[in-house]
Amino acid sequence: MMAYGSYPGGPRGPDRPPYQPTVYTAQPDKSYVGPAVITWALYYLGAWIVGLIVNIVYLSEAGRYAQATGRPASGVGCLWALLIVHLLLPLVVVAVLLVLGVLGAIAIPFIQTQ
């Protein structure tokens, strides 16, 4: 337990100056453009599931980086765009194929009778 008025650094003495300047070290910005290109290549080389998993991993890593540094990394928008497009694109394709199948099933009796 610390006494009233004390602090963890201990009392200032002759060997410890009364003021120690704060030293800020610049951290280089992290870029996720390269991982976005890798993810894009995985999506289009036929490894859609692997691309999806890699995309989610990179997005979570970018989130941890943004939380640790207080600023977002560059290229995160690319990862989000890839995720949104490649989650919606299969849904749209399946929906279009489903609609075409239903319309085709409805149209077959009309085509056969004429």
Image (cartoon, grey):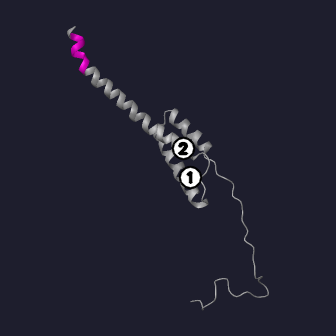
Left/right placement of residue 65 relative to residue 84 reads right
Q: Secondary structure at mark 1?
A: helix
Q: Amino acid at mark 1?
A: Ala
Q: Is residue 109 magenta?
A: yes
Look at the image and give the residue range highlighted in magenta: 106-112
Residue name at image x 21 percent, y 15 percent:
109
Q: Which residue is mark 1?
A: 62
Q: Residues within 10 Å of mark 1 (few under 14, many from 20)?
A: many
Q: Which residue is mark 2?
A: 79
CB within 8 Å, label 1 to label 2: yes
Question: Which residue occupies the foreground of this view, 74 or 64?
Answer: 74
Q: Amino acid at mark 2?
A: Leu
Residue name at image x 68 percent, y 86 percent:
10
Name the magenta segment's main secondary structure: helix
Instruction: Indicate the position of residue 31 as horizontal and vertical percent values.
Output: 63, 48
Instruction: Indicate the position of residue 9 as horizontal and vertical percent values.
Output: 67, 83
